[in-house]
Amino acid sequence: MATAEFQLIQRHFAALTAPHADLLLGIGDDAALLRGDVDQAWVWSMDTLVEGVHFAAGADPAALGHKALAVNLSDLAAMGATPVAALLSLTLPEADAAWCAAFAEGFGALAEGHHIALAGGDTTRGPLSISVTVLGRVPAAEALCRDAARVGDLVAVTGPLGDAALALRLGPEAPTALATALHRPVPHLEAGSLLRGLAHAAIDVSDGLMADLQHVCTASGVGAMIRADCLPRSAAFSALSPRDGLQLQAGGGDDYVLCVTVPPDHFQTAQRRLQSAGLALHVIGRIVAGAEARLCTAEGHAVVLDRGGFDHFSEATADV
Ligand code: ADP
Ligand code: MG
């Protein structure tokens, strides 16, 4: 979510309804927390994919089914939550049985892999758009919120950055591994739940590392210093100029890895816990006093990216 989107949400929706005793966390994080049994919270999130904005006309319906659920699960992962169920709202230009079968296969395979029930939804006719709501659960005290980063925390990510942005640029020429990162992202649910009780803050990288980390900094009232040379990258990046690669890694979106802040005391435990599950935790920087998420070289020189994250309502993208 970028500035113009943020302003639109703040102005019209953030205070639309009165506070509710059972709503532990409302608008503004990766997902909302609703009080559950004693020490459990229900976790809700919703994301929409629109043809021509999030995917091109003619996109593979099986990949769309996967991705529509995956991007939602990624928001649950960023709260440290375990998914339970989903609602699916489909707006389709026509009742195309082959398209629906392929979409259902992609959606269903990912849902089954995480034991998620498709609990309902809605189907209407119109320009192709897919909206998914997911419901999960987390121990309320261990939810990974955006406002919990503290000065001195290490900033770490749970996977490589920039693969999806590079695949988008390369188009059909993209090597399979990169294309898979773009079209069938894997939500880092296991990493999120293993980091409960160890990480302070978390966000999933959907709009671009620096733009998303800025949300954590703003919510927590801190700054961040990120080392450009520490961003985990795939082999394909060695063919790009360092500047070009960095732009994709730190500014490109659709990564769906988690960016977490971990107090130094907990870092080894967190990294071991993830490693023994075959997962990764790469340190990329530190939380510092201030208000901005900044990128710097190994020598400490500031690096400025061309532009922040994707913003649906900024001037440049107002016509999408
Ligand atoms: P993310 O990029 O993590 O998916 P979003 O940018 O979609 O997050 O949303 C940021 C926050 O704003 C979330 O808490 C979300 O629930 C809330 N939000 C977004 N759009 C609306 C809306 N139309 N009405 C109410 N809340 C919204
Ligand atoms: Mg998110």
Image: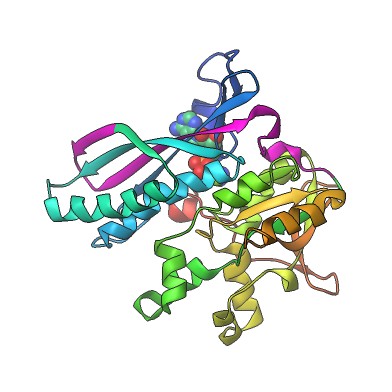
Q: Measured along the vertical axis of the image, is residue 265 above or below residue 136?
A: below
- The residue under the point 50% across, 50% down is 311
* 287 on left or right of 254: right
Magenta includes 147?
yes
Magenta includes 158?
no
Near-viewer residue (243 or 227): 227
Near-viewer residue (256 or 297): 256
Q: Measured along the vertical axis of the image, is residue 123 above or below residue 159?
A: above
Residue 288 rendering spot, x and y as whole percentages: 85, 51
Q: Residue furthest front?
A: 276
User: Which quadrant of the figure contains the N terminus?
Assistant: top right
In the rendered image, which quarter is residue 199 located in?
top right
Q: Which residues are magenta?
A: 121-150
- The residue under the point 43% across, 79% down is 175
Residue 295 rendering spot, x and y as whole percentages: 74, 63
- The residue under the point 54% across, 54% down is 207
Residue 217 rendering spot, x and y as whole percentages: 73, 45
